[in-house]
Image (cartoon, grey):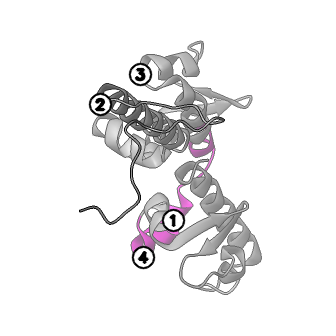
Amino acid sequence: MHDGPARPPHPVRRPNRPSIIVDETMKTRLGSLLVLGFVLVTTSAAAAGIDLHRMWDDRCSGCHGHAGAFARQHLRVVDGRLVGHHPDRDMRRFLHNHYLAADEIDAVYAMLLAQAGSSARFKQQCGQCHGSASGFIRKSLVLRDGVLYGRTSDRPVHRFLEHHRGLSPDDAAFFTDVLTRVAHEVYRP
């Protein structure tokens, strides 16, 4: 005995809807395409935002040490250009030949250029309490719309530094600039 309405002997086709039959092979292919699409999107997004300091620590520091110390000891800035031991050598080409991805060469060049042209004041004056600038930034600071904020206080860093350890206004501005530059190297878009 059957309680429901009688079923027709064959599937009913609705006039304005095409019928799609999906077999297991098609399901597998669709699933593979979705996974591939997800991997491509997440990989390209991640590649665009590589933390330059982590990359240096993972791939370069074994031979070259800390990026800042390396840049200050082995590189110099001449007419706004980064120059190594061989002044006629193109440093971007050198970086390319040093196993950097093409989309990271300019970013690493800019990082080394900034470090070669600056002092190690953060390490000397702040490192005892805060460690490296990049480590401090990852742990304690966030970058929003180009402005650096304390992660827990949500206070702009420049305002905090105006009253930190007796820093002069010039020193507060200097350290704000250094931390903001490094934050852009850590939190890349």
Residue holding disc 3: 98
Pointer 2 and pointer 1: residues touching (CB < 8 Å)? no
Task: Pick whichever, 110 or 173, lies toward us.
Answer: 110
Q: Residue 17: which quarter of the image?
A: top right
- Secondary structure beneath dot 3 equals loop
Q: Identity of the amino acid at label 4?
A: Cys
Cα gap from disc 4 to disc 1, whole angstroms:
13 Å
Pointer 4 and pointer 2: residues touching (CB < 8 Å)? no
Q: Identity of the amino acid at label 1?
A: Ile
Magenta span contains residue 74: no
Residue 61 located left or right of residue 173: left
Residue 114 higher or lower than 170, as above or below: above
Q: Identity of the amino acid at label 2?
A: Glu
Q: Going from the N terminus, do you reach mark 4 or mark 3 first?
A: 3
Residue holding disc 2: 24
Cα gap from disc 4 to disc 3, whole angstroms:
34 Å
Pair 2/1: label in front? 2
